[in-house]
Image (cartoon, rainbow, N blue to C red):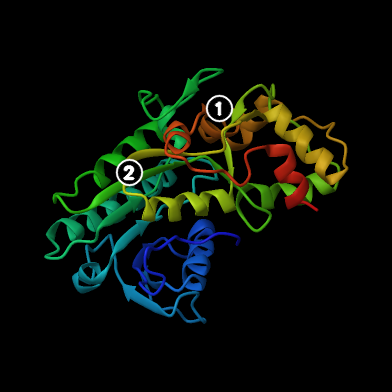
Amino acid sequence: MRHSIQRKDPGNEMHIVIAGSSGFIGSALIELLLRDGHRVTRLVRSKPTDAPAAPEHSLWDPYRELIDLEIIEQADAIINLSGESVASRWTAKKKKAVLESRIKSTALLTRAVSSAQTPPRIFISASAIGYYGKGGETWFDESSDRGEGFLADVCAEWEAAAMEVNNSVTRGVLPRFGVVLSKKGGALKKMLPVFRLGLGGRLGSGEQYLSWVSLEDALKVLTFSLQQDIVTGPLNVCAPAPVTNKEFTKALGTALRKPVKLPVPAPILHLAFGQMADETLLSSARVRPSKLLSSGFQFQDPELYKFLQEECA
């Protein structure tokens, strides 16, 4: 990690409560915050049996509406990264889990923040660029209307739950994450073994746009959101230069010095993943991070080719 939260008083730590702390982004964020001297409390559904990444934890259960209000009272900021992964076939059971895991956790946190006598100053609740639906070559920014489809519906309900905070103290931020790339986890980690074997290729036509962001920049956006009072509401978390799937495939193959000659036809993806393939793997999302750019945020990894060359070295 090459960045940190800028504080007016270097000796003044923040107390940050994180839900979804065991995930790809959450675990990396905790490591960064602790190294920068902040107090972190993880919200967990069961007591950790291994050595936790953070020195503190607090039990909660969104499905039973259980949370320690004292922890919320003590916090300077709440970061909500909770949510079931969407990366598998969407059965009716899977769709219910994806939606409920987001809405129940967010609604519980919203009620806790609203009822706090001393509310946290910041509530950051994750969302995703799935909000915009399928876009082809159309550019989207934070002012764009929501799209259609399961993911768009989930994101809209997810954000609506987060915006129910009812006080004049707490600043709300809704980071809409693009595809977060790192060799340590997520989509890129899963792709690397395939591409290293020379079995990588475009998905479908390859013309669909991928709005991506490096893990470093995703973390940098979260810490930027903690420190910058001008950052509020929906916030696209993606690099300023989205690429097509065909361009991404070529860039990754070049970085690994491997050929990319085995495209996966759309019908195969439909057969394997159904609706999930339509709304993720084959869907086009050309998203611009307008609010970040206008607020002065500086991307560490603005260009895909250079990022992959360094990440895969």
Number of numbered discs visible in the structure rendering: 2
The residue lying toward the viewer, choosing from 171 and 294, is 294
**In which quadrant of the rendered view does residue 255 lie?**
top right
Residue holding disc 1: 283
Crowding around mark 1 (Cα neighbors within 10 Å: few <14, some 14 to 19, many 20+) is many
User: Is 234 located above or below residue 125 in the figure?
Assistant: above
**In which quadrant of the rendered view does residue 1 lie?**
bottom right
Frontmost of labels 2 and 1 is: 2
Say whether residue 244 is left or right of residue 257: left
| Numbered tag placed on residue 230 in the rendering | 2
Disc 2, SS: loop
Point out the tag, 2 or 1, that comes first from the N-terminus. Answer: 2
> Who's the residue at 78% across and 46% down the image?
309
> Who's the residue at 45% across and 31% down the image?
290
Residue type at numbered disc 1: Ser
Say whether residue 226 is left or right of residue 310: left
The residue lying toward the viewer, choosing from 4 and 176, is 4
| Numbered tag placed on residue 94 in the rendering | none
Q: Residue furthest top?
A: 137
Expressed as whole percent of the image width and height from the top left, the position of residue 33 reads 47, 67
Expressed as whole percent of the image width and height from the top left, the position of residue 89 reads 53, 41
Disc 1, SS: loop
